Amino acid sequence: MQRLLLTVDKISTFMGHVFSWLIVALTALITWEVYSRYVMNQPHAWALDAQIMLYGTLFMMAGAYTLAKNGHVRGDVLYGFFQPRTQALFDLILYILFFIPGIFALTYAGWHFASESAAIREQTFSAEALPIYPFKFVIPLAGLLLLLQGIVEIVRCVRCLKEGAWPKREEDVEEVDVEKLKQMVHVKDEDILAVDRVLVAHPEQMK
């Protein structure tokens, strides 16, 4: 099971690394367009559309990669104090109630948007039009990768609830020094453990 989890992590990581090169392409395009516009006095109507599509692709395709690295924004000020089982319980509820339905809807709707766009060979509205339908296929692709990674995260939550510890990831990075944060807000482990026990014993109190 651990090997399967890490395999999906590696797929998300690989896709993130591949599409991260769009940063280089985007930087080069912006630099070239600024030079062409202000030095050579030859602006291009399609340049802004291309920049938007490059950035949009980069943003969308980074979602599964960021989830695989546990890098999405969360309320670490409270979450970081909880024991792994409590963290897993919170995550599992949120994944089931919000993440899976939302990402499934994104993938399903995105496929229809992309298919309709391809059927009419949709283009941008600038004077120098660019085809936009290839860009729209990024939506269902990003959604599918996020959905796959989300299922892996749900499996991790279930394993953590059973074992009391988070399964290892391909790379673990501690973004917040929890021990220093505890000292700053004067919170003791005993207090956290007491809250932890109440939440595990009575999950309905989280509502």
Image: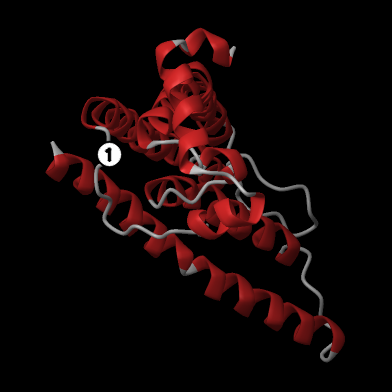
Q: Quadrant of residue 5?
A: top left
Taking the image as drawn, is residue 96 in sight? no
**Residue 106 to residue 80: above or below:** above
> Three-letter amino acid code at disc 1?
Ala
Which of the pair 44/21 is nearer the observer? 21
Query: What residue sits 36% from the left and 30% below the top?
Result: 85
Q: Quadrant of residue 130?
A: bottom right
| Left/right of residue 60 with respect to residue 6 in the rendered view | right
Query: What residue sits 62% from the left and 49% below the top?
Result: 186
Query: Where is residue 176 drawn, in percent x and y?
Result: 52, 57
Query: What residue sits 55% from the left and 47% below the top?
Result: 135
| Left/right of residue 190 with respect to residue 41 in the rendered view | left
Query: Where is residue 81 drawn, in percent x and y?
Result: 51, 41
SS at mark 1 in the image: loop
Q: Which residue lies under the disc numbered 1?
A: 165
- For the residue carrying disc 1, how many other residues have a C-alpha within 10 Å: few (<14), some (14-19), or many (20+)? some
Query: What residue sits 23% from the left and 25% below the top?
Result: 162
